[in-house]
Structure formats: structure tokens, C-alpha cells
């Protein structure tokens, strides 16, 4: 079962991703997408998780078809400099994991368990994972060996070009695109949406509506009054400033986003094939827009450039209570947003649309389907939020009111509280991970990486000299694999 006529409001990345998935799964549905040329898209959102690979795979879009058109690069993980002041743990890398990490990963867990008990074991995650070495050596995470040694990876891409690429494809496949401003939403007596009123194109009706109108949530929040639950008690950043910078066309390309802690938030740097995407996500309680812009420019070493384009943004952090309500599904920023520290927003877009298609296609009781769909999406969002909040909660930055507030005043969920309390005891932590395995969105390796990577170990174990060599053996092992099997990133991209 599926709706006969769907109208999507909004043509940002969420709108075009939703359109692509709906068109693919329900080829007989008549789909219209209305977007405004007066109201722009958010214009950021250039990093992904490995989940996006499945999006292209499901649509049978090969990497050579989309990546060069979107100046895309591969992503092996995220580097986190300056989040901790623990000696030896000032920076760490959160890699995407793969089967090549099983042995060295177990060794890392053992090292972390020993170090928690006060034994210096050099349990820094950077030595133990293949994707960490891939990023440090500027390799592409694409094995060229005959054996199937594919490892997990995500992408960096130009968000505007990706939306255009998907749009052209949807139009070729028959989607109707209306360029107009939505001026109102008409409701039926039962509370369902009957039509979107527009400036020039009249009323656009449909059986089902998808709200991709960005933070304002024109349909789900404004017309249907679905409640928005803010996460402002646990995540304090509410603003961002974004700047694109040029890139030398010959220099090596890293496969990582770099997320550096600054005075009142953190700055991202995303390497695309032709430029860098940069930005500073910050709390306006501690710094104003001009100060943030200045601090970002200093961080990027571009304070001397006056003519560079700067984009200031406000962020609404939280989620709607129901993502599917009446005959409307909210996708993207309209359904909610957790700040972009782990680049999870498009993963949530994809997850929401895929789960919706499954739930709606199911002939059983629609009300029950709707409820379990909303529960699933909320669970996913809250699982991501808990992992993001952890970065702030366990920071050890001194002399900063912002970082002190993050450490001392961020509200955390009961699940996260239980995990953090258990961390110090190796057995308890393993038990807690097992207890929560059905609800955790980030899995065991990610929890070890973040808590060990931030140096959450007894002080005496951080002061001892490292007398253990396993970490360097593990690093050599990962490096050998990387040098033997993985090509240079820039060179691989040019072949695409
Ligand atoms: C600072 C920052 C960094 C981010 N980084 C990442 C990242 O690295 N990775 C990631 O996955 N995500 C990231 N995101 C999130 C990501 O940018 C968004 O999830 C993604 O771009 C989808 O946005 P959207 O399509 O929901 O909204 P938008 O891009 O805002 O699109 C809204 C659309 O609705 C249309 N519209 C609005 N009102 C009307 C109207 N009245 N009439 C007609 N049309 C209308 C607009 O024209 C536009 O087409 C980031 C977000 C921020 C704020």
C-alpha cells in the first residue's frame, strides 16, 4: 500500500534525498516537489557517515557517476584536536570500523581496560585502526587488491551540487518540480493536510505531504502544531559561521573531517576535491557572531582576507515529538537537528525515509505502524544525541567558562549516565554495553574510542612512561595493510 500522490515541500538535500528514495521505491506514485527560489537552502552539510553508501547503492548510482560531479572525496573518520588536555590525549581520531580492525581493535580494548586500572598501556585509539592510518597517509579507503577487502567509509561532498545531481535525476525519472513560494497550508476537517497554497501556482494537493522546509517546519510544526522538544539543556551550541577556502590542486587530500575545539564551540574543516568547507559551531551565550567569525578566520589563518564570503546561521537543536503525523512526514531540519559534530543529519534523513517506506508499505494497522515508526526515529535521534553530548561532557579543557559549562551543566540521559559511570570499571563497562546493546546507536568501538581518546584514565597512568610496545606493533600492522592495499586518495579520485 502507498499514497497515489505525494507533494514534497522544500528542495534542500533532505527534499531531494526523500524524492529519490520515494521515486525508487514507489515508481508509480505521482511526486511533486515545490521549492522556493527566494528562500535558499541551508547551504552546509558536507560530511556523511558510511550509511550514505547504501543510499547510492540502493539507487544504483555508481561513485564515478556522482562523486566527480559533486567534488566529493572519501571519508575515513573524524579527527578531534584540542578536546582534551590530558597529556598524550590532546587529539584523537574516530575512525569508521571494518573487519580489518577486529584483531587490533580487541588489543585496543584490552589496553584501555588495563589503563583504566592504572597501568600505563598507551591505550590511545590512534594506533589500532586501519582507517586512522588511511587518513593520516592520505590514502583512499578503496582496496585495489583482488580479494574483497572493502572497508567502511563515508563521503565529503558539495551539498549544493549533490542536491542538483539528485534533482536532475528525479526530473529525468518524471518528478514534477514547481518553483514557487508556499504561502499557506490548508487542512481538512480531520486535521489532515489537503493542499499547499502557493504564490503563483495555486493550491497543490496530494494524499500525502513531506515537509522538507528546513528549520521552520512549515507543515509539521507550523500547520500541524506538532510539539518540538529542544535539546538545549544538553547541547549549548545554537549558531554557526561557515566559510569556504581554496585548496591547492596538487596537495594530498586527507580522508577526514577535522573538528577542532575552539573557545566557545568547535570548528570543522572538510576537504573536498576542489576546496575546503569550514565552519565554527558555537554558543551565542559565550561569543557573538563577529567574534566567532574572527576566531574562525584566525584559526584558518585567513584574517588578512577581506573579500571572503561568510555565512552566519542559527541552529534549532532538538526534534519534533512525531515525525509522521496525520498525512505528513517531516524529513531533514524540519524534523529536528542535533549539532553536526558527527555529521549524522543526512543519515537521519535516509533512515527516516527508508523506515517510513517500510512502515507505510505494511498493510497492517496504520496507527500502530505510525507509532512504532515514530518511536524508532526518536530512538535513533536520541542515541545519536547521547554520543554527541559525550564529547562535551567528558572534555577536560580548563580556563574556559564555555567548556566548564559543557562539562558541569549538560543534562544527560539515564543511559549515557550509566555508561559514563561504568567506564572506570572494565567489567562493569562491558556489562553496561551489553545491557544497552539493543538501544545503542553508536557501538562498542566508538564508545571505547571516545572515552579512551579523551584520556579518561587514572592520572597516574597518564604520567608513567610507556613501556609497552604493542601499540606500535598494532600501528605497524595497520600501516602495512594500508601501504600494501590502498591507493593514494587524490590519484584514486582523479581516476574516478
Ligand atoms: C552548521 C551546520 C553544519 C552541518 N553539517 C552537516 C554535515 O556535515 N553532515 C550532515 O549530514 N548534515 C549537516 N548539517 C545538516 C544539513 O545541512 C541538513 O540536514 C541538510 O542540508 C538538509 O537540510 P534541509 O533540506 O532539511 O533544509 P534546507 O537546506 O534549509 O532546505 C529547505 C528547503 O525548503 C524550501 N522552503 C522553505 N520555505 C519555503 C516556502 N515557504 N516555500 C517554498 N519552499 C520553501 C527552501 O527553498 C529549501 O529548498 C549541518 C547543518 C548545519 C546548520
Image: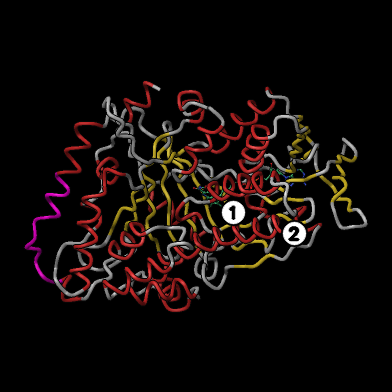
Looking at the picture, tell me which residue is in the foreground, 431 or 144: 431
In this rendering, position of residue 86 left or right of residue 201: left
The crowding category of the residue bearing disc 1, from other C-alpha atoms within 10 Å (few below 14, some 14 to 19, many at least 20), is some
Q: Please identify the quadrant where the N terminus is shown.
A: top right
**Compared to 75, does 287 lie above or below?**
below
Alpha-carbon span between mark 2 and mark 1:
20 Å
Q: Nearer the viewer, mark 2 or mark 1?
A: 2
**Compared to 269, does 32 lie above or below?**
above
In this rendering, position of residue 27 left or right of residue 248: right
Task: State the SS at label 2.
Answer: helix
Looking at the picture, tell me which residue is in the foreground, 179 or 329: 329
- Within 8 Å of ligand 1, the CB of disc 1? yes
State the residue position of label 1: 313
Task: Choose the circle earlier in sequence order: 2 or 1.
Answer: 2
Identity of the residue drawn at 33% across and 35% down? 150
Residue 103 image point, x, y percent: 21, 50
The verdict on residue 12 being magenta is: no
Identity of the residue drawn at 50% across and 51% down? 344
Q: Please identify the quadrant where the C terminus is shown.
A: top left
- Please state the extent of the stretch shown in magenta in the rendering: 463-476
Identity of the residue drawn at 16% across and 38% down? 480
Looking at the picture, tell me which residue is in the foreground, 342 or 279: 342
In this rendering, position of residue 4 left or right of residue 58: right
The crowding category of the residue bearing disc 2, from other C-alpha atoms within 10 Å (few below 14, some 14 to 19, many at least 20), is many
The verdict on residue 473 being magenta is: yes
Farthest front residue in view: 364
Per the rendering, the mark at residue 221 is 2
Amino acid at each position: 500500500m502507498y499514497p497515489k500522490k505525494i507533494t514534497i515541500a522544500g528542495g534542500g538535500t533532505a527534499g531531494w534525498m526523500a524524492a529519490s528514495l520515494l521515486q525508487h521505491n514507489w515508481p508509480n506514485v505521482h511526486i511533486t516537489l515545490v521549492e522556493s527560489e527566494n528562500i535558499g537552502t541551508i547551504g552546509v552539510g558536507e560530511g556523511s557517515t558510511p550509511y550514505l553508501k547504501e543510499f547510492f547503492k540502493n539507487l544504483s548510482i555508481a561513485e564515478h557517476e556522482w562523486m566527480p560531479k559533486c567534488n566529493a572525496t572519501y571519508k575515513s573518520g573524524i579527527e578531534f584536536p584540542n578536546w582534551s588536555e590530558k597529556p598524550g590525549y590532546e587529539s584523537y581520531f574516530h575512525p569508521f570500523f571494518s573487519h580489518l580492525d577486529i584483531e587490533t581493535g580487541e588489543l585496543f580494548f584490552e589496553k584501555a581496560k588495563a589503563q583504566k586500572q592504572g597501568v600505563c598501556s598507551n591505550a590511545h585509539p590512534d594506533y589500532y585502526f586501519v582507517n586512522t592510518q588511511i587518513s593520516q597517509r592520505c590514502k583512499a579507503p578503496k582496496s585495489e587488491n583482488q580479494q574483497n577487502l572493502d572497508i567502511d567509509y563515508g563521503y565529503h561532498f558539495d551539498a549544493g551540487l549533490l542536491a542538483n545531481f539528485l534533482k536532475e535525476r528525479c526530473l529525468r525519472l518524471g518528478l514534477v518540480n514547481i518553483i514557487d513560494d508556499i504561502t499557506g497550508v490548508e487542512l481538512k476537517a480531520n486535521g489532515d493536510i489537503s493542499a499547499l497554497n502557493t504564490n503563483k501556482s495555486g493550491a497543490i494537493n496530494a494524499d500525502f505531504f513531506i515537509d522538507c522546509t528546513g528549520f521552520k517546519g512549515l507543515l509539521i510544526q507550523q500547520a500541524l502544531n506538532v510539539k518540538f522538544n529542544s535539546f538545549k539543556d544538553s547541547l549549548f551550541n545554537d549558531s554557526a559561521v561557515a566559510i569556504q577556502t581554496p585548496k591547492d590542486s596538487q596537495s594530498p587530500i586527507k580522508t577526514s573531517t577535522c573538528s577542532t575545539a575552539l573557545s566557545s564551540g568547535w570548528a570543522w574543516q572538510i576537504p573536498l576535491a576542489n576546496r575546503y568547507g569550514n565552519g565554527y559551531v558555537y554558543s551565542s551565550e559565550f561569543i557573538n557572531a563577529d567574534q566567532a567569525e574572527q576566531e574562525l578566520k584566525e584559526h584558518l589563518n585567513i584574517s588578512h582576507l577581506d573579500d571572503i564570503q561568510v555565512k552566519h546561521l542559527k541552529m534549532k537543536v532538538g526534534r519534533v515529538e512525531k515525525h509522521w503525523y496525520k498525512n505528513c512526514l517531516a524529513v531533514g531540519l524540519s524534523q529536528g537537528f542535533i549539532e553536526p559534530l558527527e555529521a549524522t543529519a543526512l543519515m537521519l534523513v535516509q533512515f527516516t525515509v527508508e523506515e517510513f517506506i517500510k512502515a507505510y508499505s505494511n498493510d497492517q494497522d496504520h496507527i500502530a505502524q505510525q507509532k512504532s515508526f515514530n518511536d524508532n526515529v526518536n530512538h535513533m535521534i536520541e542515541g545519536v544525541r547521547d554520543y554527541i553530548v559525550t564529547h562535551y561532557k567528558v572534555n577536560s579543557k580548563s580556563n574556559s567558562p564555555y567548556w566548564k559549562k559543557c562539562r558541569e551543566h549538560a543534562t544527560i540521559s539515564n543511559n549515557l549516565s550509566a555508561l559514563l559511570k561504568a567506564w572506570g570499571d572494565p567489567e562493569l563497562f562491558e556489562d553496561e554495553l551489553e545491557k544497552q546493546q539493543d538501544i545503542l546507536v553508536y557501538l562498542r568501538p566508538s564508545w571505547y574510542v571516545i572515552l579512551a581518546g579523551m584520556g579518561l584514565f587514572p592520572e597516574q597512568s597518564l604520567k608513567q612512561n610507556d613501556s609497552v610496545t604493542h601499540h606500535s606493533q598494532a600501528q605497524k600492522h595497520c600501516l602495512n595493510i594500508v601501504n600494501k592495499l590502498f591507493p593514494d586518495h587524490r590519484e584514486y579520485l582523479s581516476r574516478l
